[in-house]
Image (tube, rainbow, N blue to C red):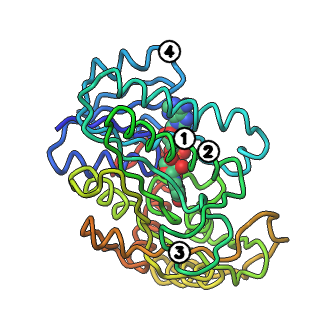
Amino acid sequence: MRALVTGGAGFIGSHVVERLLQAGWQVGVVDDLSTGQRANVPPGVQLHVSSLLDPELPEWVAYFGPDVVFHLAAQVKVSRSLAAPVRDAQINIEGSIRLLEACRQLGKVRRVVYASSAAVYGEPHVLPLPEEHPIHPLTPYGLSKYTVEQYLAIYRHLYGLSYTVLRYANVYGPRQDASGEGGVVAIFAERVSHGKAPVLFGDGAQTRDFVYASDVAQANLLAAQTPEADGQVFNIGTSQPIRIDELADHMQREAARLWGVPAVPRVHQAPRPGDIRDSCLDYRKAKEVLGWQPQVPLDEGLRRTLEWYRQQRLVGPAERSDR
Ligand SMILES: NC(=O)c1ccc[n+]([C@@H]2O[C@H](COP(=O)([O-])OP(=O)(O)OC[C@H]3O[C@@H](n4cnc5c(N)ncnc54)[C@H](O)[C@@H]3O)[C@@H](O)[C@H]2O)c1
């Protein structure tokens, strides 16, 4: 099987690439390296450095000839979607339509697996959120993610292009950008593994659902392989709400246990406007239809993540041992 992974040089995309290679797929990546890194793409994978907005995209897609397209490339920063909504829509909506057009023209793509987000739901009415929860995105980013879900449905209806939508909770793990927003585990890991205080917005009692990157990669593989997943939407989370202050405490304790790093008192800053208080996804449908469930417990995922960030700082990104 030939897989094209858009955004495959990024955090989650690189875990998807890794999983597909393990499963024996041939993998190509399209990524403009705007936030992704060449070093995240393993040897043997064809990397095409290009934007989704590049007019030559269809030619490259046709040249590579994928059976399945895993579409993860996106402008992922909520704050940037507020500051520059036109750019957000260009990359996330127009870029996705261009990709779907390329798939349609090629005519042999068996499925598009799309990386959507819990951000499509907005403020939760019930926790954990099932897929039937009302859709009410509160940011241009959330709306752009949902708009593409709708385009996928239209392309299936009009042209028979099969698709599966995966709505991720908060994904964490090695290779996440610690300078970005939203990646709270990455930001904490970068700081606490070197004895710096974690910075919390608000009182820290807000909760999130943290799912490990390799589990998300496995969900992508299953979504591509499960016939019943055609035209379906799945939440990919753990259904376990975790308080942010408890997350910070746990990571500090773990850094102390692993390396003797002393835990310094955490710092609280004003809550960020627009932040949802609680977010948690019900993954029962993914379990029933895809046979997916999270495998990496939070303790284990956090330990692996801390170790990776610690090593990054010690050896530098250019010499990453795991890529
Ligand atoms: N990280 C999370 O917790 C999370 C949660 C929900 C959904 N998602 C979705 O998962 C996907 C991957 O996110 P991530 O966290 O790995 O972010 P990331 O920034 O690491 O990955 C995005 C990748 O897309 C590439 N890219 C951006 N614009 C592009 C363009 N115009 N053309 C080609 N490539 C482009 C970037 O260079 C990067 O490699 C995104 O679609 C995001 O919306 C992520």
Callout 1 environment at 10 Å: few (<14), some (14 to 19), or many (20+)?
Answer: many
| 225 versus 280 height, above or below | above
| Kind of residue indicated by mark 2 | Ser
**To which quarter of the image does residue 181 belong?**
bottom right
Ligand 1 is within 8 Å of the C-beta of the residue at disc 1: yes
Say what secondary structure mark 2 lies in.
Answer: helix
Crowd rating for badge 2 (residues with CA inside 10 Å; few <14, some 14–19, many 20+): many
User: Can you give x and y, in whole percent of width and height, for residue 59 in the image?
Assistant: 36, 15
| Horizontal side, residue 315 vs residue 16: left or right | right
Q: Tell me if mark 4 has few (under 14), some (14-19) or many (20+) residues whose alpha carbon lies within 10 angstroms of its own.
A: few
Image position of 66 with respect to 252: above or below: above
Q: Secondary structure at mark 3?
A: loop
Q: Which mark is residue 55?
A: 4
What amino acid is labelled 4 in the image?
A: Pro
Q: Position of residue 68 (x, y in %)?
A: 27, 39
Residue indicated by mark 3 = 129
From the image, state whether disc 2 or disc 1 is nearer to you. Answer: 2
- Counting residues from the start of the chain, the first of labels 1 and 3 encountered is 1
Is residue 313 something that shows in the picture?
A: no
Residue type highlighted by circle 1: Ala
Where residue 74 is drawn, which disc sits there?
1
Spatial separation of the CA atoms under disc 4 and disc 1: 17 Å
For residue 238, what is the image quadrant?
bottom left
> Quarter holding the N terminus?
top left
**4 or 2: tag closer to the N-terminus:** 4
CA–CA distance in space, label 2 to label 1:
10 Å
Comparing 31 with 69, the one in front is 69
The tag on residue 144 is: 2
Q: Earlier in the sequence, mark 2 or mark 1?
A: 1
Question: Along the horizontal axis of the image, is 107 left or right of 312?
Answer: left
